[in-house]
Structure formats: structure tokens, C-alpha cells
Image: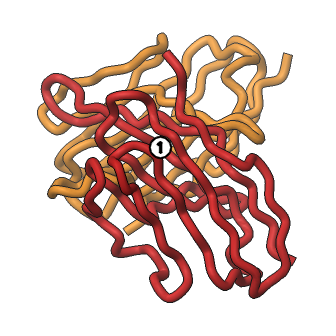
Chain colours: A red, B orange
Amino acid sequence: EAGVAQSPRYKIIEKRQSVAFWCNPISGHATLYWYQQILGQGPKLLIQFQNNGVVDDSQLPKDRFSAERLKGVDSTLKIQPAKLEDSAVYLCASSYPLAGGGNEQFFGPGTRLTVL
Amino acid sequence: QQPVQSPQAVILREGEDAVINCSSSKALYSVHWYRQKHGEAPVFLMILLKGGEQKGHEKISASFNEKKQQSSLYLTASQLSYSGTYFCGTYSGGGADGLTFGKGTHLIIQP
């Protein structure tokens, strides 16, 4: 079974530029998440989609970050304009529900963003 | 709120045991454990559900004290491949089931 795919793997930009990340979840997984992982910390949830609808975007800095999942499969996360503090690894995950409750989230390899 | 993990770092010799703890100030529905190696994605280890059910893929064990909102991950007879950073992710219920992760515990296994 193919895993969660993300691209690009690395990106270096100057502050105030824009950048976009792409994610293709595991086939059949209705739920998709974007997490931000700053060096030395655990992943922080930015946004969660169920099919093509947003379930939770309470921690997404909406003045500069946007995300979409138009057809309920692939997703893109955009930052415009980028700030120095956006330097992080952006992880995409997808999940399926487990019998009896809970879910197992599968993470992609991430995109490492460096803002200069 | 972010769960608190302890210890922050552990150095073991191969074959030794370790316990990693995760504590939350919120009532929890589930606790998820992941291991992340440098430069790689987090890999699912185990989920512990309110009510006692556990699901995992590897030969590891864990506990979940619902009353104290605490979970512990037990690594026995450690192997070199166990090295990495261990994260607990917590879910407190509700429609959105994104996880809140701790800062991680760095585990180094020496031969």
C-alpha cells in the first residue's frame, strides 16, 4: 500500500515570498491533516479535513496560511507571505477509523521549509 | 493544552528497559504513541483508548490511567532500532480528532 506522498521535500524561500505544499493521502482515507513541526518540538495541528470539508482550522494562522482539498483527495497548503518563524517541517497525515474507536494516523515524509 | 512528557531524554545500553511518561491536564479519550527518527516521518506505535482497549503494531506495551490522564510507554530489552524521539499525542473527544503532541522524549540506545 502506498503511503502519504508530499512534495516538495525541501524548500528555501526569502521572507515575504509565497510557497505551496502538496499532499496526496493514502487511497480511501477520508480524513487529512496538516501539522507544523518546529525543530525540537512535537507536531502541531494546523488544519483537519474530512473529505473536502474543514473540520478544524482553529490553529491555522489565517492571515497568511490557507489550505484546500477540492476533490476530497489531494490537498495543498499555502503560506503567503512567509515569515522567518514559519521555518519548520510541514507534515501531512491521513487516517482511517479503527474498529472500536480511535483512528490511526499515517504521516508523510514532510516538507522542510527554510525561510531566510 | 500540550501534554507533558518525561523524561526529556534517555540514554540506554542495548538490552536495558525504559519507561516514557505522558501526562495531560485534560480528560482524554485516547493516547497515541509515535516514534520519529531524525529526518523521517513519525511512525505509529500504539493507541490506547478510554475503556482500556489498545491497538499497536510492535512488541511494545503501554498503559493508560484514565483517572489521572496519564499514559506510559514501556520499552523492554531495548534494541538499537528503538533509538529516536517518542511522541505522545492526545485526543480529548469531539468531532475533530487531530492530535495534540508533547515535546517528545529522545531515546538513544548504545551498543
Residue occupying the point 29% across, 63% down = A54
Hey, which quadrant is residue B49 in on the image? top left
> B103 above or below A115?
above
**Chain hosting mark 1:** A
Place of residue A7 in the rendered image (x, y in percent of width and height, measured from the top left): 68, 46
Label 1: which secondary element: strand
Place of residue B14 in the rendered image (x, y in percent of width and height, measured from the top left): 75, 15
Question: A106 left or right of B65?
Answer: right
Residue occupying the point 51% across, 40% down = A24
**Along the viewing direction, whichever of A41 and B41 lies nearer the viewer:** B41
Question: B46 left or right of B17?
Answer: left
Residue occupying the point 37% across, 69% down = B1
Residue type at tag 1: Ala
**Along the viewing direction, whichever of A81 and A95 lies nearer the viewer:** A81
Crowding at dot 1, Cα within 10 Å, few <14 / some 14-19 / many 20+, comes out as: many
Q: Which residue is mark 1?
A: A93
